[in-house]
Image: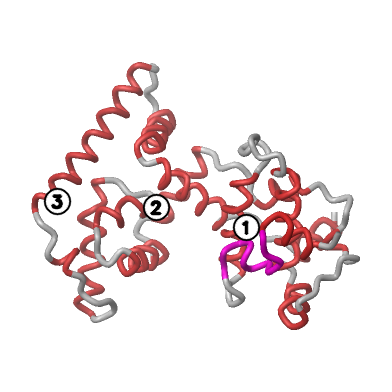
Amino acid sequence: MGLLDRCKELFKTSNLYEVLGINKEATEAEIRRSYYKVSLKVHPDRAPEDPLATEKFQVLGKLYAVLSDKEQRVVYDEQGVVDEESDVLSEDRCWEDYWRLLFPKITVQDILEFEKKYKGSDEERQDLIQLYMQHEGDMDAITASALCCSQEDEPRLCSIIQAAIKSGEVKEFPAFTQETDKKKRARRKRADRERQEAEEMQKEMGLGDEDDSLVMMLQQRQKSREQNFNSFLSDLEAKYSKPSGKSQKSKRGKK
């Protein structure tokens, strides 16, 4: 059975883009990020209750291999077919190894280094503006979704948004410009409570250095805001994962 038929059987659609929840115009980065998030849901280790998890995971690997290969993607986009005999869909490939090559595990040090480069960068600003527009100025949703964001960052983030509004770059949303003091206090109180709980957990476990403190912060964030925490790691892994396709093949061939 070919890839398109397997997609139809396992994901109820033979459209490769629909399986990933994206459209045909998606960028390479968007395809990679969507592949990561969808494949994570059916990873055999994470979805043991799904008897078809392994098959779905393998099919998603093949799907991504096609869409991440420029020549294969052009053929699929123009003709709606997949070259089942291509090296891209090699049957002897270990799709678990392929996935881990693309998405190596994120360590505490990786997060620390990313945070150092990300904060204050143009990338952070662009992401923040996008979140502002997406959530129509709701700072609760913005701060919950922003990468590497803590209560201490809020004044800085607000100033970035205010400057963008003043320059006409983005529209003015009442949820942001007219946010009540009561809502701001509630957000601060919630952040203080999360920080206090993390500190208590840290003391109970006898942790003290910076890396351990970060681990505790992340564990507490996972406990209190699991969806956003997982989204943070997903975005980080997918955004800074190794490129795939022919470039990887050529590198291996040179060894």
In this rendering, the label closer to the viewer, 2 or 3: 3
Q: Earlier in the sequence, mark 2 or mark 1?
A: 1
Kind of residue indicated by mark 2: Leu
Categorize mark 3 by other alpha carbons within 10 Å: few (<14), some (14-19), many (20+). few
State yes or no: residue 102 in magenta.
no
| Residue found at x 21% / y 36% | 192
| Residue found at x 73% / y 43% | 54
In the rendered structure, the answer to whether residue 56 lies left or right of residue 87 reads left
> Which element type, helix, strand or loop, lies under badge 3?
helix
What are the residue bounds of the magenta stretch?
Answer: 12-22
Could you say where residue 255 lies in the image, as x and y percent from the top left?
A: 85, 54
Distance of label 1 from label 3 (alpha carbons): 36 Å
Q: Earlier in the sequence, mark 2 or mark 3?
A: 2
Distance of label 2 from label 3 (alpha carbons): 21 Å
Counting every numbered tag in the picture gives 3
In this rendering, the label closer to the viewer, 2 or 1: 1
Could you say where residue 27 lies in the image, as x and y percent from the top left?
A: 58, 72
Distance of label 2 from label 1 (alpha carbons): 20 Å
8, 68: nearer the viewer: 8
State yes or no: residue 15 in magenta.
yes
Q: Which residue is mark 3?
A: 183
Kind of residue indicated by mark 3: Lys
Q: Quadrant of residue 250?
A: bottom right
Kind of residue indicated by mark 1: Tyr
Q: Which mark is residue 147?
A: 2
> Which element type, helix, strand or loop, lies under badge 2?
loop
Could you say where residue 140 lies in the image, as x and y percent from the top left?
A: 25, 53
Q: Dividing the image into 4 quarters, which one contains the N terminus? A: bottom right
Q: Which residue is mark 1?
A: 35
